[in-house]
Image: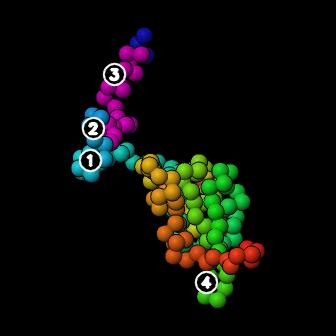
Amino acid sequence: MLTMIYNLIEQFFSRKETNPFPGTHVPENTPVFLQSGQLTQPVPVPEHFRGKPDFDYSSCIGCGMCERVCPARAIELYPVLEGEKKSKKIVIFLSRCTYCGECADICPKNAIRMSGEFMLAGFDRNDDSMIVGNLERREHEIHQPAGEAPD
Ligand code: SF4
Ligand code: SF4
């Protein structure tokens, strides 16, 4: 009994680990609320938190190791031209990603890094914000002529 009272008093005075994120009350209109700037900032994530994978296009050598280890089949390779040479780059579909970090661990060029970003909800899984590297894909992907086998 004494231990319980001690724990209650200790918790009453100790620092809170959570906060009323994203606001104190459920807003009437969430999109308007998010744009209003009244957002309560989230608690900082711990050092090795695995949030949205970041991809560095220029570091990627197209080896495909990330695609092979991804348990969720969330990574897709596509062909690009680097100078005269054919190579490959990747996109990551966040709607499939389980944030396991295997791709970042295996990448020999550190082209993938698990960031601290966790606000990843969206209405359209095909939106650029839900496909890491999609903007670069649109700019650089080369399309094989019909009938030609991919490298
Ligand atoms: S974090 Fe895991 S699930 Fe997500 S893309 Fe990388 S390997 Fe695949
Ligand atoms: S493992 Fe790294 S270098 Fe290889 S394709 Fe994936 S991101 Fe590119």
> N-terminal of the two: label 2 or label 4?
2
- Real-space Cα separation, disc 3 to disc 4, in angstroms: 64 Å
**Callout 3 touching callout 2 (CB < 8 Å):** no
- Real-space Cα separation, disc 3 to disc 1, in angstroms: 39 Å
69, 120: nearer the viewer: 120
> N-terminal of the two: label 2 or label 1?
2
Q: Is residue 8 magenta?
A: yes
Q: Quadrant of the C terminus?
A: bottom right
**Residue drawn where x is 37% and y is 20% of the image:** 8
**Residue drawn where x is 47% and y is 61% of the image:** 128
For badge 4, the amino acid type reads: Glu
**Residue drawn where x is 61% and y is 83% of the image:** 82
> N-terminal of the two: label 3 or label 1?
3
For badge 2, the amino acid type reads: Pro
Q: Is residue 104 magenta?
A: no
Q: Which circle marks residue 82 in the picture?
A: 4
> N-terminal of the two: label 3 or label 2?
3
Q: Secondary structure at mark 3?
A: helix
Task: Give the residue number, with chain letter if any, for mark 3.
Answer: 9
**Callout 3 touching callout 1 (CB < 8 Å):** no
Dot in front, 3 or 1: 1
For badge 1, the amino acid type reads: Val
- Real-space Cα separation, disc 4 to disc 1, in angstroms: 43 Å
- Image coords of residue 84 (percent x, y): 64, 89
Q: Provide the residue span drawn in magenta.
A: 4-24
Q: Secondary structure at mark 2?
A: loop
Task: Give the residue number, with chain letter if any, for mark 2.
Answer: 27
**Callout 4 touching callout 1 (CB < 8 Å):** no
**Residue drawn where x is 55% and y is 71% of the image:** 137
Task: Give the residue number, with chain letter if any, for mark 1.
Answer: 32
For badge 3, the amino acid type reads: Ile
- Real-space Cα separation, disc 2 to disc 1, in angstroms: 9 Å
